[in-house]
Image (spheres, rainbow, N blue to C red):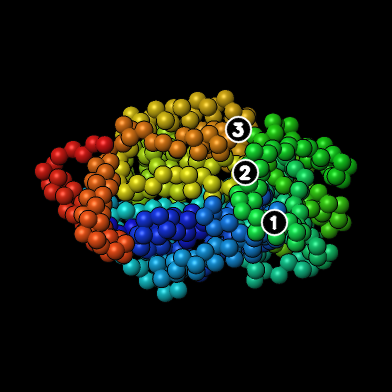
Amino acid sequence: MPRVVIIGAGPGGLSCAIALKRKYGFDNFTIYERGGEVGGTWRASLFGASSDVSVAFYSLSTDLRDWKGSHGSQKELLDYWVDLAKKYNLYPHILLNHAVKSVEWDTTNNHYHIVAEDASTGKSSSSTAEIVISAIGVLDTPRFARIPGLDTFKGAKFHSARWDSSVELRGKRVGVIGNGSSATQFVPQIAKDPEVRIIQFCRTPSWLLPDNRVQYSQTTRWILRNIPFMMRLYRWILFMRKNFTNYIKSNAPKKYVDKLVPTYPLACKRLVIDTDYLRALHQPNLDINWDGIDRIVEDGILTKKGIEHIPLDVIIFATGYAADFYPLHVRGKTHTIQEYYEQELGQRHTLAQLFPTSELLYDFWFVFRPNTVTGHTSAIFTNEVQRKVSSLEVKLSATDAYNDKIQALLNNSVWAGCISWYRVGGDGKISSLFPGPALRFWLWLRKPDWRHFSGIFKQRLQLLLRVLIFSGLLALGASRMEMFRAIQTKAFPLARSLLESVSKQKSRIIG
């Protein structure tokens, strides 16, 4: 049976592991997690983050939750994933505090070499696997703004994605750079303390939508919990509903209205739910500065307009993530993944599974990679609808055709109308988003076109052998447990043995 390594124990990695155990009875896998707990972004986001779409979408379709309200807090969502890891007994498979440093394909032995570092000791270890699944989140690597003098600042500084709880903000002059989803969530939280003096440096306004969060009544929770199919029906109702409302002018301080109303089309950038941000702007300890940053100095920031010097004790960067960069060194047959992106100058941004693996990778899979998320619903959905197969190589011609189709649709979309993290370098190709609603994504992935792949023979052979062994055991009156064990111990090894034999004869396996 092949060994599988999953990189990341966030929602993507845990969902993948759960599917392997639930759907296939497969448990020969290891999950490498650089943090001290599972949960991904919900473990790392310590500033009071919450879901910006209904929390009903943040649970797996196989494990619905009795949520307390329409939107989940960071703690509620972290608890959910910790509970699932315990429910499916995933912790014995997880190496916490182990960051994967490199993954390289061994063409001689036909497997990957994985090198990981133990964060507690600094020691490196290596392992091998026939299949590697990258569950590194799209919003994983913090991006610091390229501002001159960043390293000269002598006060405390950190990125909101790596919140430093050891930094005391009370009584401090705090500069916040950025005003996207993260900033609009944590700024109201830290502004609650009147002794924290906040100056927020903004460049481009965001479309702020009204907060439609509600706490469910006990009656509502009882209905969702006890009436069959009500939880699933509620998810589908939310899935089909859209609500775009601009209410900035009626809620923002008058002195900021002209600056806070965007001039670019609605949804060109990520839509931001107003979690008391506009209300916080009325507080005397919070100001917005639109003058632009010229440079950072030892004790603060110099603005572009009039070269004003603003003294600061702490700088918090809410400047987003490097969504157009793959942070892990993964070398396949000829290139690393990042080299492939750079070589193509952003021309090929593929669906997570649709890399031209005949050129680059073999049995290396992605969760949440280019052009897979929609920007307006939970990524859990896009993860669940992706089809799992045992071994594939994606043809280059199919990859190019798919990418051309994706980019043609994206170039005519609202996302092409402004600078955003959805695009390479902010203004290049749209590399993060899928061009359309989640329903289209589901329809596209509902039934694969096997002509676009090679390597299907392995999957079909395993299926055939399962059927043959199952039929034979059934005829002999074997129990269900005996059948399952035989399929696991006989069908998979036999399929692998046959494939190795075919490989040695250098026969081309085409589905």
CA neighbours of label 2 inside 10 A, class few (<14), some (14 to 19), many (20+): few
Q: Quadrant of residue 456?
A: top left
- On screen, residue 56 versus residue 275, left or right, reads left
Q: Which of marks 2 and 1 is nearer the N terminus?
A: 1
Asked which secondary structure carries label 3, the reply is helix
Q: Which of 180 and 426 is in front in this view?
A: 180
Q: Where is residue 176 in the image (x, y as percent from the top left)?
A: 71, 54
Question: Against 34, is 323 above or below?
Answer: above
Residue at horizontal 61 percent and vertical 51 percent from the top: 229
Question: Against 153, is 343 above or below?
Answer: above
Q: Point out the residue furthest to the left here.
A: 505
Q: Mark 2 points at which residue?
A: 236
- On screen, residue 488 versus residue 199, left or right, reads left
Question: Against 101, is 345 above or below?
Answer: above
Q: Quadrant of residue 435?
A: top right
Question: Label 1 to label 3, Cα distance in Å?
Answer: 39 Å
Question: Label 2 to label 3, Cα distance in Å?
Answer: 25 Å
- In the rendered structure, are the residues bearing label 2 and label 3 in contact, judged by CB atoms less than 8 Å apart? no
Q: Mark 3 points at which residue?
A: 415
